[in-house]
Image: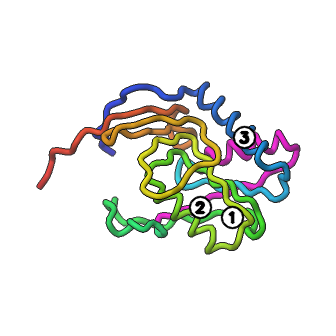
Amino acid sequence: MKDNSKRIRTLLDAQALDWALDEMAARIAKLHSNPEKMLILGMASRGIPLSQELAKRLSEKYGVKIPSGSIDATFYRDDFHYRKQIGNPEMRITEMPASVNGKIVILVDDVLYTGRSVRAAIQAIFDLGRPSAIRLCVLVDRGHRELPIAPDCVGLTVETDVDQEVRVLIRPIDEENAVYLVKVEADHERS
């Protein structure tokens, strides 16, 4: 895939990302003392390995296995039909290790930007049942919200310009664990 972006700076290297995940797990544990009611859901795609890492750390902290799953809310997005489509989009399977009913769902995403993906994920969760609460946990909050959505737990908050993006790279999807601020260059190839 061709990428029209240029790295500006490293926001988190592998060690800092690891530390951010430790801090996020500690924040979640401080907010919720009852692990039996907890369910961690990662948003496709990089929110999934992040949620698995958080579930592992929380399981160690509580001494019990914290269930984790994944959710793909692509088709719940309010701008789905207006977004640039890449090929033929396929619905990714939502993996639910337990019912959401009565659970405290910790929704995990890599980057919080407009809030549209989070709104869509919340709608998808409610289609699966009625949790007692949904808490949003994001690795990076880059601002520029279009919807009134705020995270309960953040690894890093960074101010970005409109022509910048935050790129999270995480294993096993990527070859390294890091977060970069990139400048997106305009695509001059118009037909």
Say which mark, if any, is on residue 151: none
In percent of width and height, residue 35 lies at: 83, 52
Specify the amino acid type for callout 1: Met
Q: Residue at x 83, y 39 (%)?
A: 61
Q: Secondary structure at mark 3?
A: helix
Q: Is residue 94 left or right of residue 168?
A: right
Q: Position of residue 181 (x, y in %)?
A: 41, 33
Pick whichever of labels 3 and 2 is earlier in the sequence.
Answer: 3
In the image, which disc is placed on residue 96? Answer: 1
Q: Is residue 174 magenta?
A: no
Camera-side residue: 84 or 78? 78
Identify the residue shown where x is 31% and y is 60%: 84
Confirm whether the magenta stretch covers residue 71.
yes
Amino acid of disc 2: Ile
* Mark 2, secondary structure of its residue: strand
SS for dot 1 = loop
Q: Is residue 13 above or below residue 89?
A: above
Magenta residues span 48-74
User: Which quarter of the image is occupied by the N terminus?
Assistant: top left
Residue at label 3?
Answer: 27
Q: Residues within 10 Å of mark 1 (few under 14, many from 20)?
A: some
Does 174 sit left or right of 41 as displayed?
left
Mark 3 against mark 1, which lies toward the viewer? 3
What residue type is disc 3 on? Arg
**First in residue order: circle 3 vs circle 1:** 3
Residue for badge 2: 71
Say few, some or many: other residues with alpha carbon within 10 Å of mark 2 (under 14 / 14 to 19 / 20 or more). many
Residue found at the very far right of the displayed protein: 63
Identify the residue at image location x=54%, y=26%. 13
